[in-house]
């Protein structure tokens, strides 16, 4: 009620800024994850979001983004979960180079990786063509509508969905300032439009949400069979460093992928067996032994839904 009265007096924009300042104050006072650029190769950095669900309190800073500085400009991989976060990332980039961001490559069109896109005006945006289906879906619109409430003021009425300028359908090489980037579609896995970005000269692979570290993966409407295959084909890049969509970068790629692999395998095994035996979901869920995963952050928030989605997926398989 108070908010609504204030809203009439001040308008959403002003109220947004006030709330933003209040939250910023909170952020200063609490131990909110600050954004820091971590270097993983001579010309490559990334920032790491929190292992949490997106909220006003964490600014929706729950996913990673990276950037590669080339002699002709900067290539950003993923746009973070709000325009303000993307501006903060731009600030970190400017501390390292005066060159502009010329390209943004998206690993997939999930909210926490794309709501910052509008901050990169003028840059080319590259993504997999299946992202168009998501953008034109009612789901994308309803998710944005609820994010404008749940993640206010970081997501507000000025936040918009931005389409790519370049939609690709197959493996594509992007050469910027002599630096070669390989954009390789590996979906449908976590999403239909999954794309990994390999920078051979840097030995770096941006895996997007094919790899989750330090938390329970978000399965959603994934294709877990292809996801397991995609993880295997990712190993073929033989990258020195993998920057995941969530969690810290990995230099021991094979070992660090095991958590995602083991989790997806276990979901498929338990829920697949239950679907085959026509055991109702609730019973199958309660019967499964989650001890190997229940210590991971977001287990409570995500595991049941992940299991349920996998159960439905296995019924169709
Ligand atoms: Zn994500």
Image (spheres, grey):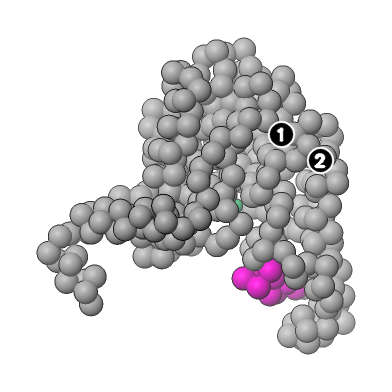
**Quadrant location of residue 306?**
bottom right
Q: CA distance from mark 1 to mark 2?
A: 10 Å
* Mark 1–mark 2 CB contact (< 8 Å): yes
**Residue 205 - label:** 1
Task: Report x, y in % for residue 69.
Answer: 56, 21
Q: Say which of 187 and 304 sits in front.
A: 304
Residue 152 visible from this viewpoint? yes
Residue tagged 2:
253
SS for callout 1: strand
Residue nearer the viewer, 105 or 302: 302
Q: Quadrant of the N terminus?
A: bottom left
Q: Residue at x 85, y 43 (%)?
A: 254
- Count the marks: 2
Which of the pair 298/190 is nearer the observer? 298
Residue 113 on the magenta span:
no
Query: Percent position (x, y) of residue 151?
Result: 41, 60
- Residue 46, compared with residue 228, is above or below; it is above
| Kind of element beneath mark 2 | helix
Question: From where the camera sits, is residue 137 visible?
Answer: no
User: How busy is the neighbourhood of tag 1: few (under 14 within 10 Å), some, or many (20 plus)?
Assistant: many
Left or right, residue 76 beside residue 307: left
Q: Is mark 2 within 8 Å of ligand 1?
A: no
- Residues packed near mark 2 inside 10 Å, few (<14), some (14 to 19) or many (20 plus): some
For image coordinates 82% across by 40% down, the residue present is 252
Residue 8, position as x, y percentages in the image: 14, 66
Q: Which image quarter: residue 70?
A: top right
Q: Which residues are magenta?
A: 299-311
| Overall secondary structure of the magenta section | helix
Q: Is residue 197 above or below residue 16?
A: above
| Left/right of residue 106 with respect to residue 312 in the rendered view | left
**Ligand 1 within 8 A of label 1's CB?**
no
């Amino acid at each position: 009620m108070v908010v609504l009265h204030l809203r009439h007096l001040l308008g959403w924009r002003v109220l947004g800024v006030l709330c933003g300042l209040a939250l910023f104050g909170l952020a200063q006072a609490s131990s909110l994850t600050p954004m820091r650029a971590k270097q993983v190769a001579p010309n490559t950095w990334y920032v790491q979001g929190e292992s949490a669900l997106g909220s006003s309190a964490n600014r929706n800073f729950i996913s990673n983004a990276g950037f590669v500085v080339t002699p002709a400009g900067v290539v950003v991989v993923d746009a973070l979960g709000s325009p303000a976060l993307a501006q903060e990332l731009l600030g970190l980039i400017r501390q390292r180079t005066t060159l502009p961001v010329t390209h943004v490559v998206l690993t997939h069109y999930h909210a926490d990786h794309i709501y910052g896109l509008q901050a990169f005006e003028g840059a080319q945006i590259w993504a997999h063509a299946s992202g168009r289906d998501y953008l034109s879906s009612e789901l994308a619109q309803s998710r944005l509508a609820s994010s404008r409430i749940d993640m206010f003021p970081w997501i507000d009425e000025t936040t918009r969905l931005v389409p790519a300028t370049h939609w690709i359908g197959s493996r594509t090489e992007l050469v910027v300032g002599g630096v070669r980037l390989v954009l390789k579609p590996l979906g449908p896995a976590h999403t239909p439009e999954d794309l990994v970005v390999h920078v051979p000269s840097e030995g770096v692979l941006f895996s997007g949400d094919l790899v989750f570290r330090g938390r329970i993966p978000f399965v959603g409407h994934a294709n877990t069979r292809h996801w397991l295959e995609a993880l295997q084909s990712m190993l073929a890049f033989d990258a020195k460093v993998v920057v995941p969509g969530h969690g810290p970068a990995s230099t021991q790629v094979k070992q660090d992928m095991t958590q995602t692999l083991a989790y997806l395998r276990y979901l498929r095994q338990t829920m697949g067996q239950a679907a085959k035996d026509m055991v109702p979901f609730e019973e199958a869920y309660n019967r499964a032994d989650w001890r190997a995963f229940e210590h991971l952050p977001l287990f409570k928030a995500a595991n049941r839904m992940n299991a349920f989605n996998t159960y439905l997926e296995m019924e169709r398989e």
